[in-house]
Amino acid sequence: MQTSRLEAFSDGVLAIIITIMVLELQVPEHHTIAALWHEAGLSLLTYLLSFVYIGIYWNNHHHMFQLTERATGGILWANLHLLFWLSLYPFTTAWMDESHLARVPLTAYGVNLLGAAIAYVVLQTRILRAEGSDGPLRRALGRDLKGKISPFLYVAGIVAAALSGEDARGATIAALGFYVLVAVMWVIPDTRIERAIAGS
């Protein structure tokens, strides 16, 4: 079957996820920059991080399906698996924010990031199996170094978050640093698939 319905459904779900996240933001009671930073600064930063992650997944998902000719049953279920983990972003983002980066919510956020990354790899693997050993996506991905490094950085962030707390603010900063590092890695444009699309 064609991938158009899968792509349209995924786009809709991701749009709803972003909408839910922005509705979680609280408007400051006072109308000053100081009040904005004091009352909503952390919320805006955690929203920004999760928004960037959703944007990365939307971008990569779009590109990947430009090189995918058909959707099998396995691909449909793998796509739903990915959307499940992404749909948890508003919850884990809000929990992390409202707890002021407490240990368990910060760890749960990292687990959410790792779960989405694993789900994306599962989806990608299902597509590669469906298209065979010489499909366009396989040729475009190459060694996929960023994809192999990212899970290890997430695990490092989760471990740091599990060690964080009131007496270990350094671990909290380290955990956030690992989460941000992966986002920065993927925000940097990756032209592998675009080159493959242009070549085809």
Image (cartoon, helix red, strand yellow):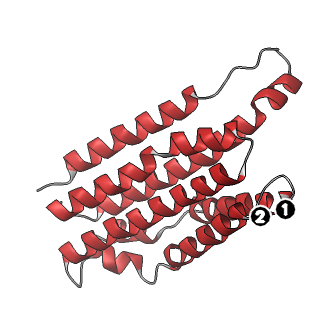
**Which quarter shows the N terminus?**
bottom left
**Which quarter shows the C terminus?**
bottom left
Front residue of this view, candidates 100 and 123: 100
Question: Which residue is drawn at the image coordinates 57% and 77% (left, top)?
Answer: 149
Residue 179 image position (x, y, % from top left): 65, 60
Question: Which residue is drawn at the image coordinates 37% and 50% (left, top)?
Answer: 84
Q: Residue 136: which numbered mark, if any?
A: none
The residue pinned by badge 1 equals 170
Q: Is residue 178 above or below residue 40?
A: below
Front residue of this view, candidates 197 and 159: 159
- Identify the element where label 2 is drawn: helix
Seen as rendered, the residue at the extreme left is 1
Residue 71 image position (x, y, % from top left): 18, 60
Mark 2 is on which residue type?
Ala
Mark 1 is on which residue type?
Gly
The residue pinned by badge 2 equals 174
Residue 23 image position (x, y, % from top left): 55, 26
Q: Could you tell me how far apart the alpha carbons at marks 1 and 2 are, in whole angstroms?
A: 6 Å
Q: Categorize mark 1 by other alpha carbons within 10 Å: few (<14), some (14-19), many (20+).
A: some
Question: Which residue is drawn at the image coordinates 65% and 44% (left, top)?
Answer: 96
Circles 1 and 2, Cβ within 8 Å, touching? The answer is yes
Q: Is residue 70 visible?
A: no
Residue 62 location, quadrant: bottom left
Residue 39 location, quadrant: top right
Question: Which residue is drawn at the image coordinates 59% and 43% (left, top)?
Answer: 93
Q: Count the numbered circles shown.
A: 2
